[in-house]
Structures are given as structure tokens and as C-alpha cells.
Image: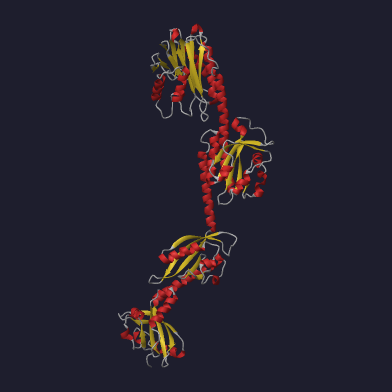
Amino acid sequence: MGSVVMRAPVDDVAGGAAWDAGGWLGELRVAVVATNADGTIVRWDHGAQALLGYPSREVVGRPIADLLHPGADRSLGRSLWDSATAGHGVMATVTAWHRDGHPLELEIWAAPVPARHRGGTTVLVFAADAHTARGIRGSSAVWEGLFVRSPVGIAVFDTQLRFLRVNQALQAMNGLEEHAHIGRSVVEVLHAVNAAEMESAMRQVMVTGRPILDFRRTGRTHADPGHERVWSCSYVRLEDPDGRPIGLTAFLIDITAQQQDQLEAEAGRRRLALVNEASVKIGTSLDLERTAQELADIAVRDLADAVTVDVLETLTTGGDLGPGLVGGTALRRLGKAPPAGTRIADILAPLGRTLIFPAGAPYTQVLADRETFMIAHLDKKAIAPAARHSPAPAQLLEQGVHSFMMVPLIARGVVLGLGTLYRSRPVGPFTNDDVSLAGELAARAAICVDNARLYRREHDTALVLQRSLLPQHIPQLPGMEVAHRYLPASDVNEVGGDWYDVIRLDGGKVALAIGDVMGHGTAAAAVMGRLSASVRALARLDLAPENLLHQLEAALEDLAEPMLATFLYTVIDPANGRCHITRAGHPPPAAVSPDGTARLLDVPPGVPLGVGGTPFTTTDVTLQPGSILVLYTDGLVEARGSDIDERLAELTHLLEQPAPTLDELCDRLLIHLTPASVDDDIALLAARLNPSTG
């Protein structure tokens, strides 16, 4: 038989077939050989040369059986001829002889191809390394098993990002059969997911070759159209042996449950963090207004867009909290966040405003029921009960408030007020978890508000008690002019036990007394009153100063609870300027000479009353006519972060500056030596010996 001339080169036919077959066949080096019907080689491609080592010129025209291993079956040529005459293909494994002299096991596929000229038959033979072919078949089987049985959704796309294959798991996820995917893009198949973002990520992988892992697909599919779901997607580019992209594989896992658990865990962490922050930032002081504002500031951070905190009016005035709510209620707005500057905040009543609510108003009802009231979805119907009493609910609805909550402030079984939370941000309505969190914040704030209420009551009681025990009238004293001041601690600090007194004695003498009971509140004020009464009674017995102090110490020992007090006692004879001064741990007195020179008098400090076991010493000092004696408690000269010696030096410097009157001198000392918020009580007593008495 003569050789057969084929229309298309065998290289082109084989290359196109391999390319069309995709990535698996592309990984296998295939030799393409053509013989005539008697087995004579008529075509030898480059793949055959690479596989067996023979160039075309050495094998064309030779029987194909010559390439077999010497021990192989020589009937191959006959089998091919028989197959050609019968019109069937042949598959076999044979051992060939490499040009380098070593055996090579081959898998061959032979099929007759009718010649288009002169009749006859051409046999087309494909040959490949048997070991490599078996490995590829094994990999393909593994891939096929994974693709079919995997619970992970798997899709294969072509280079245009059109579906080529989808496994059963992905069909179930999308709720569509495979035929509804093939040849279509993600955007065309899945309308209710973020398909455009997915395709953008896939296109990036196709261009760069770098995989993308854990890209989130969100939305609804035909499998579950009523619920939002979340999938984790990973994309890997498919390449041929030369690195050219031939498609893309996507792997999808439904992580809706895990995502929900993660969101709930994250929300739980945020709630815990907010509660922890509230425990630190709410109740930093015993100031009622500040505590209410701290609650508003905390709640508006992560829970609401606007918050108000209102307390019962009687709470702010020190009245009785007992009256019921049958006739309505009056609330004072003490907290608001943001205070102003937003459309919602500007609608709400400002800080300090007293709000009156009738018995049927929702605010009053929440206080009466002692339970949180929430409207998850605010609308005209929901605001109708409140709209009868105020235009604010309708205005808030117009400004986008879509969810609303009122939480009562209850501490020690007493209703103190309520917090109101408004939400307008597009994050959904208040939930039961939000109600629980708001309740925790409100409970924390309520205890702090009640502590502030109780403290204010005690503070006011102590202040009234203390002022009632201070001398109500300073008598006119011949030969002596006296000025005095008392400045209680600020509202954020407890009232102490500072006191002073001016007592007229026999023989024209005058006793000046000043003291400070250590401690604060009503107990300190009560002890102060006891000591001041004792001093007034003992002074009139004309006791020596040190004996008077011993009697005061005995009075302290009679108390059920031990107390300490500093004390300074001076007996002055205005006629001659002689002073007898005794100190019990008290700051030293200061004197100003007629020439304006100021100094601290050198008087032994002694120990505070109540320590016991230490004798007191009296120091005699003579003051010139026109001199000024200044007594004070430690609140005047002690300050945080300041050295006491520097403060005493500042005191003497202020005393040396001329002052027309003792009142002006006292005012100057208070203005220059005390801060805006006084940490401790201050008692101040100044006496001038009139020049005419000298």
C-alpha cells in the first residue's frame, strides 16, 4: 500500500484535541503517530520524538513493530491491520524501546481513519507514558469522587466566568439544577446575592492567578428565599501546563449558623464591655446631675442615638419620695445625650427642664408598672397614646426615630425616675437583648442616683446641723474688732466638723476658739456641736487653757466611737494685748503687726484631742495695739498637690497686703487660697486689737 496524505497536519489535530480536553489531558505528553494499514509509519510528530527519542527521519517508512522491545509481542502490526479491516479501535499497553536503549512502557490508543484519496486506511495511534497516564487517571478519579460526594459546594467556570459544572452540594445551596447553571454567569443565576462583588473577585483571580479565600457571599437563593444566608467562598484559577488560565474553581461553604453565632458572641462581648465601662464611668461622684448624665453618655454610645434621663422632681428638692402616681408625676431632666445639635436632640426637652405628666401618660405608666416599655417599630398608631400629651412623638417619628424604649430607675425598692432611649440609625429595632442591656445600665445608674440622693440628704442635714451650732451672733467686744467666715465643702464633698466661737469672759477678757473634728457628715457635725457647747461652758469657769483642753479630751473619750479633733484656744486681754494660746494639733495662728508685718506665731503644736497621754502647753504672747490675730482651719491652707509650707508662706504674704477692714481681709484670704470646688470645710476668725485700748 502507498502512504496516505492527510488534509490536516497531525500536530494540529492532536494539539487541538488536547486543548479541547482541558487541564487533565493537557498534563499528559501524548505522541501522535500515523501508519498505513500494514503498520508502516507514515507520520511522526514532535510529541513522539520527545517521548521515544527518535527523529522523524529515522522512523518514517519503518514498521511500527520495529519500535517494540525485543521481547514484546510482534503481532502488533497484524492486530492493527485486523482492526483497520474490521473498523474497530485498539487500546493496549506495550513495552517500547527508547532510542537511548532503555525500555519504556506505553499506553496506546489506535483507530482507523479512512483516507480521502486513493482508498485504503490510515491508522492513527496515540501513545503516552503508561506510568504518567495511570497517575492522571487516579487523580481524575479522586477529583471526580470529591466533586460528586463533597458536602462543600463546588463549581467550575470557564475563562468567561460561565458555569461549566456544579456539584450536587452547590445545586442544593442554590436551589437550582445543574442545567440551570451551565453556560450562565453568577449574576444571571443568582439575583438576590452580592453576585456583582463575587464576579469582581473571581475576575481578579483570573487576572492575577492569586487565590482568594473566605470571600463572603450573602443574600437569598431559591433554596431558602425567605431568609438571608452567608457563604464562605474560595476561588482558585485553573491553568494548563504552560500556566495559561483555562478556567476557575469555586468552593462554597454555608456559614450562616457560624456567622450568627459569631455575631451573637461579638454582641455579647460588646454588651459585656459596655456594662464594664458603665461600672467604671457611672457613679464617679455623689453628684445627682453628673450621675444622670453619665448614664446618658454611656447608653448613647452603642445602644441608642439619643438618650434622656429624668428623675422625680421631689428627688432633686430633697422632698419625700413616698407620694404615689395617681395624680401624675413631675420629672426633672438631669441627663441628655447628645445635649443639642442634632434634629432629634433639639426636639427633646433641655437639661434642667421640669416635665409634668398626667396619670395616663406613658411616662407615668412606666413608673407605676416598674417595667421597661419598648416599641420595637414606631409608627403613628404606636405613638398615639403619647401624642395626646405632647407634639414631640410625632416630630421624632418624622425625624426617623423608628424604635423607642423607656427603662425605670429603681433602687432599694424605690422608683427614682426613668431613662428613655431613641434609635434612628439603620441597624434595626431594639431587641430583647437591648432591653436586657438597658436594664443592666439602668440598675447600675439607679443605685448611683440613690446613693447621690442619700448623700445629698445627709450633706444637707449635716450642713444645717453645723450652721445651727455655729455662733449665731458675735457680741460687741470693747477694745476688739472681730470678723469671721465659714465656707462648707462643695456639694461633691462631705461637710466636715469645722467650727469657731467668740466668748466674752470676766474681767474684759475674750476667748477665741477654733476647731476641726476629723471626719465628715452628720456624725462629725454632731461631735462638733458637743465640743463647741463644752468649750462655751468650760470657758466661763475661767479654767486654764491646758485644763480646758483636758476636759474636752475627756468628753471625746465618752463617745461610743473614738473621734479626734484639732483645736486652738486663745484667751486675750484687749487692755494689754496679752494672749494665752494653746494648740492641740491645729494649724498655727498668724499675727499681723501694726506696721503690716505678718508672721506665724511660734506655739507648740501639741497633739489632736482624743489621742490622750500628752500634756498641752500654753504659750504667752503680747500683741501691740492695732495688731491682728488670725485663726483658721486646715481647709484654708491645705490643697492637693501643694506643699504646706508654700501655702503658709502665701497666707502670710496675703496678710501683709493692706486691707481697710477685717471683712475685706477675710474675703481676700478665701478668694486667693480656696479653689472653686472646696474639698474641706473652712473656718476663719480674725480679731484686731483696737489702738485706742493700748
Q: Nearer the viewer, residue 176 or 682?
A: 682
Q: Is residue 37 above or below residue 249?
A: below
Question: Residue 57: percent from the left, percent from the top?
Answer: 31, 85
**The C terminus, quarter of image:** top left
Question: Residue 420: percent from the left, percent from the top?
Answer: 59, 42
Q: How many marks?
A: 0
Q: Nearer the viewer, residue 389 or 408?
A: 389
Q: Nearer the viewer, residue 341 or 178?
A: 341
Question: Residue 90: percent from the left, percent from the top?
Answer: 44, 84
Residue lying at the far top of the rendered structure: 507
Q: How is the image coloured?
A: secondary structure
Question: Residue 198: percent from the left, percent from the top?
Answer: 49, 63
Left or right of residue 466, residue 240 in this image:
left
Residue lying at the far front of the rendered structure: 660
Q: Is residue 568 visible?
A: no
Residue lying at the far left of the rendered structure: 100
Left or right of residue 347, residue 201 in this image:
left
Q: Is residue 411 above or below residue 223?
A: above
Q: Nearer the viewer, residue 96 or 634?
A: 634
Quarter of the rendering containing residue 640: top left
**The N terminus, quarter of image:** bottom left
Q: Is residue 495 visible?
A: yes
Q: Is residue 484 above or below residue 12?
A: above
